[in-house]
Amino acid sequence: MGKTKIMEIRKKAIERNLAKFTVANKPKQKCSIYRYLGTTFDEFMDFDANSLDKSTSGQRAEGAFIRKFTKLDNKGYDTYTKCYNMSNY
């Protein structure tokens, strides 16, 4: 149970509950973000954290693609287009 944390889902206008949560007489830490099966949830359920997480992942993937493509030494537009289209699947 060492990984167990509590995330309170609430509206932004409502303050966080100050109650302490325990499981098997052990206090549990509160968190504001939770990741499950690649989706990031936050305590307000507005999915801003998920959008940010996905966009940064996409930027890393695009950067990796560009680095790999530059090693192809000007193979031409057709090669670039084929590689780019294959990366979208």
Image: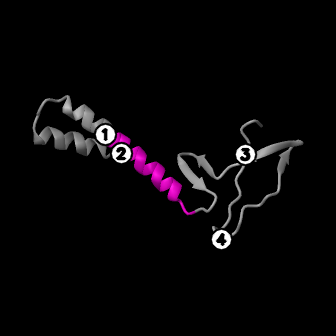
Q: In front of the other: label 2 or label 4?
A: 4
Horizontally, residue 56 falls left or right of residue 38, namely left
Helix, strand or loop at label 4? It is: loop
Q: Position of residue 86 (x, y in %)?
A: 27, 42
- Are circles 1 and 2 on residues that touch, CB within 8 Å? yes
**Sequence-first disc among 4 and 3:** 3
Q: Amino acid at mark 1?
A: Gly
- Taking the spot 71% from the left edge, 65% from the top edge, the residue there is 15
Q: Which residue is mark 2?
A: 59
**Sequence-first disc among 1 and 4:** 4
Q: Which residues are magenta?
A: 46-63
Q: Which residue is mark 4?
A: 13
Helix, strand or loop at label 1? It is: helix
Q: Position of residue 76 (x, y in %)?
A: 10, 38
Q: In front of the other: label 4 or label 3?
A: 4
Q: Which residue is mark 3?
A: 5
Q: Which residue is mark 1?
A: 63
